[in-house]
Structure formats: structure tokens, C-alpha cells
Amino acid sequence: MQAMTLTPLGSVSLIQRLVPLMDPLFGFAFSRCHNRETALDATQESLRAALEAPREWPDEEALWAWLVAVVRNKVANEFRKQRRQPLTLGTLGHTGEKAAQALVQGRDLPVEIAQRAEARQLCRAALSELPPRQREVLEAFYGGQSQTEIGQRLEISTKAVESLLARARTAMQAVMQRMVARPEELL
């Protein structure tokens, strides 16, 4: 009997580079979809794609960014697939009856609720990076207080509140854009 030789899927050095990224990559995938199986599939697909890719990554940052992009695409494709399925009690699973009632009553479906929850989580993370005064004025304004009420509480003019609110919105937008561009920082 002849000895069988196995051809490696990728270079040993690439495999060694991928091993420490597996858990954080799964964490990122899970944070995007909140489904263990989908996160495992997306992680596995990204690692397989990295091994099969006909390119080299100059550093860990480039490799990580590429893997995160693959995971993000795999999770998005899974959500797209789910949306294409006909909406039946069978596809909704054990919560099908509740979801059907929600649909009839005009309430949101679980996917929409999860998307809003993810957006709220991103907003909270971005808010936490703002200076305290900017964070305070944004929370107060979007919590329902008027600019006049905020000014009275902070003992500043309404114009100063308006200016502070504009700076806070600009800062919040910059932080959120950075977070969306570099999702690995969210882990």
C-alpha cells in the first residue's frame, strides 16, 4: 500500500496567524447575528476563504480587516436569505404564533427588533466615547427635554445649548463612522 500525501490547504504560517483570530472572529460574527450556528458558519467560511485566497496579508491588521469583511458579508447574506423565504408559521419556529400576532397587529418582527437593538448598542458605545458635557446634552435632548430646559438645568443660554448640541452631533457622527469603518474595535 502506497503512503498517501496530503497537500496543505494553506501555508503553515497563515494557519498559525489564523488560530488566535478564531475566537474574536466568532465573537464579532455572533454580535452581528446573535445566532450561534450562523456565527460558526460565517467564521468557518471566512477562515476557509483566507486559506484559499491567492494573496498574502502584509500584517495582522490587514488580515483581520479582510476576515471581518468576509464575516460581515456572510451574515448579511444569511439575513437576505431569511428574508426571501415565505413567511409561514413553520419558518418562524416556536415563536411563530406570537410573531404572526405581531404581524397582524402591526408590530415589528424579531429581525427588525434585533436591528434596532444593534443600532442602540452602537449608539451607546459611541456616546460613551464623547466628552461628558456633549453626552449629557445629547441624552437630555433625545430624552425629550427642550433646548430651553437643558439650558436652565446646565445654567447656560439656549444658544449655547444649540451650539453644544451641534458639536455633540458632529462628534457622535464621527465616532459612529469610525466604528462602522473599523468594527473590530467594537469587540
Image (cartoon, rainbow, N blue to C red):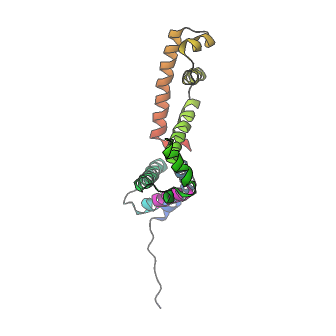
Q: Which residues are magenta?
A: 35-47
> In front here: 102 or 175?
102
Q: Is residue 99 above or below residue 47?
A: above
User: Is residue 184 at least partly visible in the picture?
Assistant: no
User: In the image, residue 2 lies at what x, y percent?
Assistant: 46, 89
Q: Which x, y percent locates residue 77? A: 42, 54
In reply to whether residue 40 is colored magenta, the answer given is yes
Q: In the image shown, does 35 or 47 lie closer to the viewer? A: 35
Would you identify the image quadrant in which residue 120 lies? Answer: top right
Q: Can you give x and y, in whole percent of width and height, for residue 81 in the image?
A: 42, 55
Identify the residue at the far bottom of this view.
Answer: 1
Q: Is residue 131 left or right of residue 70?
A: right
121 above or below 12? above
The C terminus sits in image quarter? top right
The residue depicted at 52 percent of the width and 52 percent of the height is 29
Foreground of the two, 161 or 143? 143
Q: Position of residue 178 (x, y in %)?
A: 47, 35
Residue name at image x 58 percent, y 15 percent: 150
Quarter-of-image position of residue 49: bottom left
Q: Is residue 84 visible?
A: yes
Residue found at x 56% / y 35%: 125
Q: Is residue 22 magenta?
A: no
Furthest-left residue in view? 54
- Answer above or below: position of 10 versus 60: below
